[in-house]
Image (spheres, helix red, strand yellow):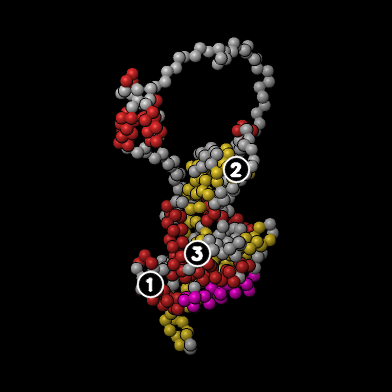
Amino acid sequence: MADFLMPALGADMETGTVVEWQVRPGDRVKSGDIVAVVETHKGAIDVECFLDGVIDHLAPIGQALPVGAVLAQVRREGEPQLDNAAAAPPAPGSATQPAAASAPVPAAAPVTTARDAPVPPTTRAKVSPAARRRAAELGLAAEGLAGSGADGAVTLADVEAAAAARSALPPPAPAPRPARGDFDPAQMRRAIAAAMGRSKREIPHYYLGSTVDFAAASAWLTAYNAERLPAERLLPAVLLLKACALALAELPQLNGFYDQDAFRPGAGVHLGWAISLRGGGLVAPAIHHADRLSLPELMDALRDLVQRARSGGLRSSELTDPTCTVTSLGERGAESVWGVIYPPQVAIVGFGRVVERPWVVAGQVLPRPLVQLTLAADHRASDGHLGGQLLAAIDRALQAPDRL
């Protein structure tokens, strides 16, 4: 029997509340199945279970539980089902209650066994063989139907009439979906403050910046989009993401986590993309294996991620997997951004607004679209030389957009 625990959906999460179970005791689950909806300060998150087996015992809905609390128990293949009371997950903070010491035991009442009880006479409804077969085909209980035959016997016509009456009924209304809790911007702000305060206290940041000539990427993007319908066009952010993903694949020392006094590389390039929420605050869910996606695939993933971040429906793996975060202020933002590392990651890449400025090209001063590229990195895991290589790799990738 394995415990399925409340996941830590980011460094800024302390508790979560199950608002909906999508499984029941006895259901079989496999790794990656969504089993619950958990309300956090980031909104309602679809939580995946990474265990295989049969669900036993579920934590109650509506109770705030700390990270690491038992949400459910999963019985592995071949394991016996335990006694319900003995195997029930303990409630956080609960203590074993001593047994009542000397409560008087009432005298036993006389016991009447089922054998002693009088047995009422039973009668069995009369059902014709044809009616019984037809009722079985239709999933009806023939004995429960009103019979119109001799001595009240249920006939084939009675069964057909009951089936017709059932089909005329409106379909049952779907079970009401439990309401997801309201987004609390104040709670979100407190959680961000806690995580960023921890980052600035614990992580020795170093910062690097570079100016990137965006002319080649901009020209390629304009030509690409001109031949496509609006729904198929790419945003500049997609090129920035792909360039970062390829650079991180080239320099994996900046793609991972710092914990237990050591750097641990990520299992893939899972780029976190910082998304501002309409109610305030932000989240940075992961786009898994961003370096392997084509630009149209990356565009689709980005659209989907932004839509779900703002309407609810992010998955727990998307909040726990980012190996490096990218933040872009977009067309209406500032010209540069110097990010704060989201622990336990070791780097964050920032892009400012694309602006047109004079730039020297082949000895001539020309107007060019430029973008400020920045890096904040953890000095415990890398140094400025490596960080500079990452910025150079991103710049190099953006100068050859047809290879992204």
How far across and down, in percent of the image, does residue 247 sit? 56, 71
Report whether residue 278 is seen.
Answer: yes
How far across and down, in percent of the image, does residue 198 sit? 60, 55
* Residue at figure coordinates x 56%, y 59% from the top left: 322
Which disc number belongs to residue 206?
A: none
Mark in the foreground, 1 or 3: 1
Question: Which residue lies under the disc numbered 3?
Answer: 327
Q: Earlier in the sequence, mark 3 or mark 2?
A: 2
- Pointer 2: residues within 10 angstroms few (<14), some, or many (20+)? many
Question: Which residue lies under the disc numbered 1?
Answer: 225
The image shows residue 343, relative to residue 20, as above or below, that is below
Query: Who is closer to the viewer here, 247 or 372?
Result: 247
Mark 3 to mark 2 CA distance (whole Å) = 38 Å
Q: Residue pushed farthest bottom?
A: 363
Instruction: Tell me the kind of residue under disc 2.
Output: Val
Instruction: Tell me the kind of residue under disc 3.
Output: Thr
- Pointer 3: residues within 10 angstroms few (<14), some, or many (20+)? many
Report whether residue 7 is seen.
Answer: no
Q: Earlier in the sequence, mark 1 or mark 3?
A: 1
Q: Earlier in the sequence, mark 2 or mark 1?
A: 2
How far across and down, in percent of the image, does residue 207 sit? 58, 69
Mark 1 to mark 3 CA distance (whole Å) = 23 Å
Identify the element where label 3 is drawn: strand
The magenta-colored residue range is: 383-403
Question: Which residue lies under the disc numbered 2?
Answer: 74
Q: Residue pushed farthest front?
A: 129
Quadrant location of the N terminus?
top right
Residues at discs 3 and 2 in contact (Cβ within 8 Å):
no
Horizontal side of 397 relative to 96 (left or right) equals left
Mark in the foreground, 2 or 1: 2
- Which is the main secondary structure of the residues drawn in magenta? helix
